[in-house]
Image (cartoon, rainbow, N blue to C red):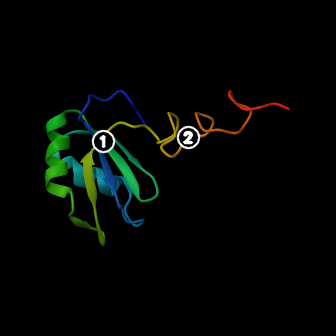
Amino acid sequence: MSTDADPGCRVFVGNISNVVSKQDLRVTFEKYGNVDEVFVSEGFGFITYDRPNGAEAACKDLDGSLYAGEYLRVEISRGRGRGRGGPPSGPSRGYGGSRGGGRGGSRD
């Protein structure tokens, strides 16, 4: 999947039915503008437009719509990549906290 699209040109599509093909999505989303790329995985995908106005129109029109038996979630991608890397979102380990052996304790 390309990562060099202009901001606002990539659309996240969630809750895609498993009967929907890449070509099905391309045909549907091309109604809103020139589609450069379509990526589909299990239950989600990304549509990349050549211009932000196509992406915005698709989001406005298709978000929450019933498509192949599922209600789609369609929004401008926030560009967080594949969700890996970066700091953990839960409680951190190894930062702060006490495991003994710190200053101020007595050593006999």
Residue 46 image point, x, y percent: 35, 46
Q: Nearer the viewer, residue 68 or 27?
A: 68
**Numbered badge on residue 88:** none
Residue at 35% across, 36% down: 79
Tag 2 residue: 92
Can residue 31 be seen in the rendering of this structure?
Answer: no
Q: Quadrant of residue 67?
A: bottom left
Residue 35 image point, x, y percent: 26, 41
- Give, as a three-letter code, the residue at label 1: Ser
- Give, as a three-letter code, the residue at label 2: Ser
Q: Closer to the camera: disc 1 or disc 2?
A: 2
Q: Outermost residue, right direction?
A: 108
Residue at disc 2, secondary structure: loop
Residue at 72% across, 37% down: 100
The reply to whether dot 1 and dot 2 touch (C-beta < 8 Å) is: no
* Image quadrant containing the N terminus: top left
Q: Quadrant of residue 48?
A: top left
Tag 1 residue: 77
Residue at 58% across, 34% down: 96
Residue 93 image point, x, y percent: 61, 40
